[in-house]
Image (cartoon, rainbow, N blue to C red):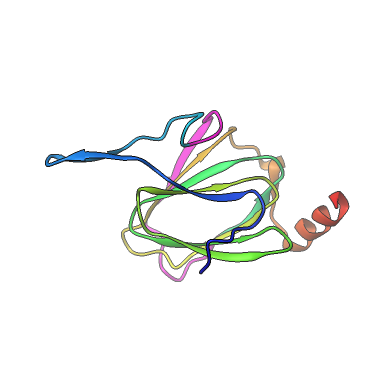
Amino acid sequence: MTETLPRGCELVELRVIGDERGSLVAIEAGREAPFDIARAYYLIETRADVVRGLHAHKTLRQLAVAVSGACTMILDDGRRREEIRLERPSQGLLMGPMVWREMRDFTADCVLLVLADSAYDERDYIRDYEVFRRALEATA
């Protein structure tokens, strides 16, 4: 796995505040998440052999954090395809629009938190990889 990510993606270190009582990680709009947060959801109880995602978004921006456990994110911008293992609650993955994403290799305890800059809108999804590729070519 490499630190060179597809266009529109970035790994961000989240600030951990803690003492002998424990730790806290805060994610604020405009700071750790470089957008207003309109939606939050999390994936739980995903089997290790399951592949999730398998889509791109036309305009949506997201920040994903494995707050517990781990999973592998596969990101593809049409030119570069990279795998990133999310396994620390102090690391987030920013994903911009027009990036194909797949999630796999979930640990049994994985809780994947995703913060998004807009509410759910099915019209923003591209769920067919070939349609995604054609959309990229049309904008090139």
> Does 8 sit above or below residue 73?
above
Res 18 → quadrant: top left
Q: Magenta: predominant secondary structure element?
A: loop
Q: How many numbered callouts? A: 0
Q: Residue at x 58, y 61 (%)?
A: 4
Please say whether residue 15 is one of the residues in the magenta stretch. no
> Does 23 sit above or below residue 76?
above
> Does 30 sit above or below residue 126?
above
Q: Residue at x 51, y 29 (%)?
A: 30
Residue 99, horizontal then vertical, whole percent: 66, 53
Res 110 → quadrant: bottom left
Q: Residue at x 80, y 54 (%)?
A: 136
Q: Is residue 32 left or right of residue 21?
A: right
Please say whether residue 44 is one of the residues in the magenta stretch. yes
Q: Residue at x 55, y 50 (%)?
A: 10
Residue 22, horizontal then vertical, whole percent: 17, 42
Residue 80, horizontal then vertical, whole percent: 68, 64
Magenta-highlighted residues: 33-52
Residue 121, horizontal then vertical, whole percent: 65, 37
